Image: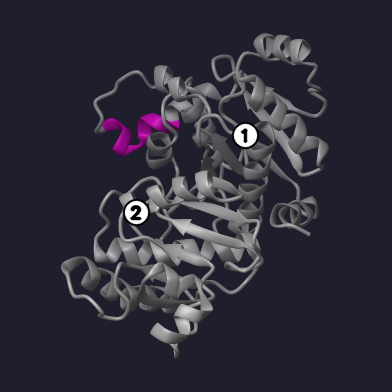
Amino acid sequence: MGFIETVFEKLRKHPKRIVFADGELPRVIRAAEIFYQRQLGVPILLGRREVIRQIADEEKISLDHVGIINPETSSELPLFCQRLERLERYRNTGNKDSHEVMVKPNYFAAMMLQYGLADALVGGANAAGGTLLRPMLQLVKPLPFTDVVASCTIVEFTSRSFGDDGVVFFADTGIVPDPTMAQLASIGVQAGLLARQVFGRRPRVAMLSFSTKGSARTPSTEKVAGAVTLARHIAEQVGADMSIDGEMQADAALDPVFAQMKMPESHVAGKANVLIFPDLNSGNISVKFVQLFSECQTYGQILMGFTRPAVDIPMGVSSDNMAAMAAIVGLQAVEYRKLYPPPDTAD
């Protein structure tokens, strides 16, 4: 059974409500149909009901058990506006029209997520609608042990020799251009926790560099080496059972032969299932190369650093891939609801 089939199987035991922010796009509507047909939970599309129904009819998409909410006419809108106005980080933006903000699908979806009206969020499919990250930062509570938000891409290789059965988690691949030592350490722990939540295997986190254990000394390599120590400390503080090692080159992280030569005593080298890149350049470029030059499936950007799960999907992904990413954040939500119960929605 492949990685995503395993995710589907687990989620069927704990179906979740997934809000799709870009509900008027045909491929998003199709993804919602696929999500329900796979018995993964209840999809909720944001958008104008008449537009969504017309597209569904034209594309022959079933809306059976698919929820539709128009933010502009929702009964929740006045309460959402009140909550937004009470947020200091919103007031500091100088924006006075909370109604204008809250009718935007990404903001409405993020508010639904924060207050337990949806278990996970899928957004970013419509670039014209604005980014997902800003509303998440303004409306969704951060994780208690970090002040950095990052993203992760899950890569499933055809070759099962990498990671765990071909599955490797790449971070950060989309947000932090040049992380500090502390940020890099936090990203490593967050990605390890994500791997544990989604895949259920013990994370083996490799902090990557162009150097292996001091073979070159530069500010960059020393930052990575220091991040290893900090990440181990954070993992111990939050009770996260994972192995973290570095700094190490990519071949030492993934290839047992090179690992034996370069880091024979390491519990991570040669069998890493989580790769932490020293900066956004290397992380994003690596994902693009992998997508272009290898036979693999990629799932992401999965947002990290929040107490609610969300994925900011790249433009152009297929409906099947989108439904799969919805399942991944849905599976995250199973654990998140135990750790971070939604606040009381009564005012």
Compare residues 125 and 85 and report the one nearer the observer: 125
Question: In the rendered picture of this protein, how many numbered marks are placed on residues?
Answer: 2
For the point 32% across and 67% down, which residue is it? 209
Disc 1: which residue: 19
The percent position of residue 259, horizontal first and vertical second, equals 46, 81
Picture disc at residue 1: none
Find the distance from the CA under tag 2 to the CA under tag 1. Answer: 32 Å
Figure quadrant of residue 244: bottom left
Please rate how many residues cluster around mark 2, counting C-alpha atoms within 10 Å: few if below 14, some from 14 to 19, many from 20. some
The percent position of residue 329, horizontal first and vertical second, equals 61, 48
Q: Earlier in the sequence, mark 2 or mark 1?
A: 1
Q: Is residue 146 left or right of residue 271?
A: left
- Above or below for 311 versus 132: below
Which quadrant is the N terminus positioned in? bottom right
- Tell me the element at label 1: strand
Residue 84 inside the magenta-drawn segment: yes
Q: Is residue 200 left or right of residue 93?
A: right
Residue 53 inside the magenta-drawn segment: no
- Above or below for 338 versus 24: below
- Tell me the element at label 2: helix
Compare residues 336 and 215 and report the one nearer the observer: 215
For the point 24% across and 25% down, which residue is it? 94
The amino acid marked with disc number 2 is Ser
Please rate how many residues cluster around mark 1, counting C-alpha atoms within 10 Å: few if below 14, some from 14 to 19, many from 20. many
Q: Are marks 2 and 1 in contact (CB under 8 Å)?
A: no
The amino acid marked with disc number 1 is Val
Specify the segment rendered in magenta: 83-91
Disc 2: which residue: 282
